[in-house]
Amino acid sequence: MLKKIQQTSEYIKQKTNAKIEIGIILGTGLGGLVNEIETECVLEYSDIPNFPTSTVEGHSGRLIIGKLGGKWVVAMQGRFHYYEGYTMKEITFGVRVMNSLDIKMLIISNASGGINPNFSIGDLMIINDHISLIPNPLIGANIEELGPRFPDMSEPYCKDLISSAKNIANKNNIPIKEGVYVALTGPTLETPAEYKFCRIIGGDTVGMSTAPEVIVARHMNIPCFAISVITDLGVDGRIQEVTHKEIQLVSEKAEPKLTQIIKELIKKN
């Protein structure tokens, strides 16, 4: 894996002179944040050695390098999921490459289903912890150059970044929630009983991503910040049939608020 990571990062470094500080992974319907980036370089996933390609609608499959909030960022416009048939190592390969590009922080966004009865469609929720019910991406031989065999996960999401983001949201009168994200395999949306189970075990939202990327980032000691857009509800009595297209539309509507928080968070940290 180290050889592949090096090969990929060297290819990217040949395309830019940027001193990248921050990595960003954009989820379903949230790829428009890249419009705020002062773009220096755009790379299609299909052109990058060893990189998987995104197969999900709403995930463009491009790597964007440029400036956001006055800092150099590398943004994945489209991510990879377990339900697409990728291995966990393929899903998290982009984070490994970002580490090789010397990022100092990873910011992740996603679309998720709200299972906290106090949540509404369109809410933003800062993730302060997760429960991962999908295979751990660190299963298998450990590569000591990347991180320890048994990485600590007592602070998967950086408390300082969470506090900063909450202050930014309050200052800009953006309503914000905070809670626990439950990661499931997908691609089916959850049954009413599964929503109830996820709530009972301590979840506030459910989704099909994020936790693997955060686990790998923390393995390499990269601070993480993640935020969800609540695109549908898994609350008893409020569950309705929903399509992927509807999820995208809700995400896109919430995007300006999300963009403002992320831009200011990058500027301040």
Image (spheres, grey):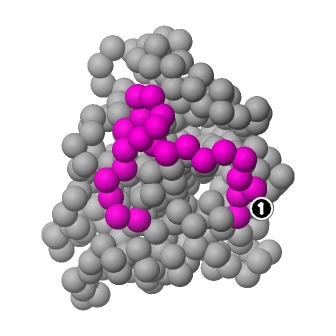
Residue 247 versus residue 153 in the image, above or below? below
Q: Is residue 75 left or right of residue 179?
A: right
Q: Is residue 39 left or right of residue 232?
A: right
Residue 51 versus residue 181 in the image, above or below? above
Residue 124 image point, x, y percent: 54, 72
Mark 1 surroundings: few (<14), some (14-19) or many (≥20) residues within 10 A = some
Residue at the disc numbered 1: 264
Q: Nearer the viewer, residue 61 or 257?
A: 61
Q: Total of numbered circles in the picture?
A: 1
Q: Residue at x 76, y 50 (%)?
A: 67
Q: Residue at x 24, y 85 (%)?
A: 240
Of the 4 image quadrants, the one containing the N terminus is top left
Q: Residue at x 43, y 80 (%)?
A: 249
Q: Is residue 127 visible?
A: no
Q: Nearer the viewer, residue 119 or 84?
A: 84
Q: Secondary structure at mark 1?
A: helix
What residue type is disc 1 on? Answer: Glu
Q: Residue at x 42, y 59 (%)?
A: 59
Q: Can you name the residue that lies furthest to the bottom here?
A: 237
Write the start and end of the magenta stretch as one range.
36-58
Residue 154 image point, x, y percent: 52, 37
- The question of residue 186 being in magenta is answered with no
Residue 203 versus residue 103 in the image, above or below? below
Q: Is residue 175 left or right of residue 244?
A: right
Residue 34 image point, x, y percent: 62, 60
Q: Is residue 95 left or right of residue 17?
A: left
Q: Is residue 40 visible?
A: yes
- The question of residue 47 being in magenta is answered with yes
Residue 51 image point, x, y percent: 42, 34
Residue 71 versus residue 153 in the image, above or below? below
Q: Quadrant of residue 158?
A: top right
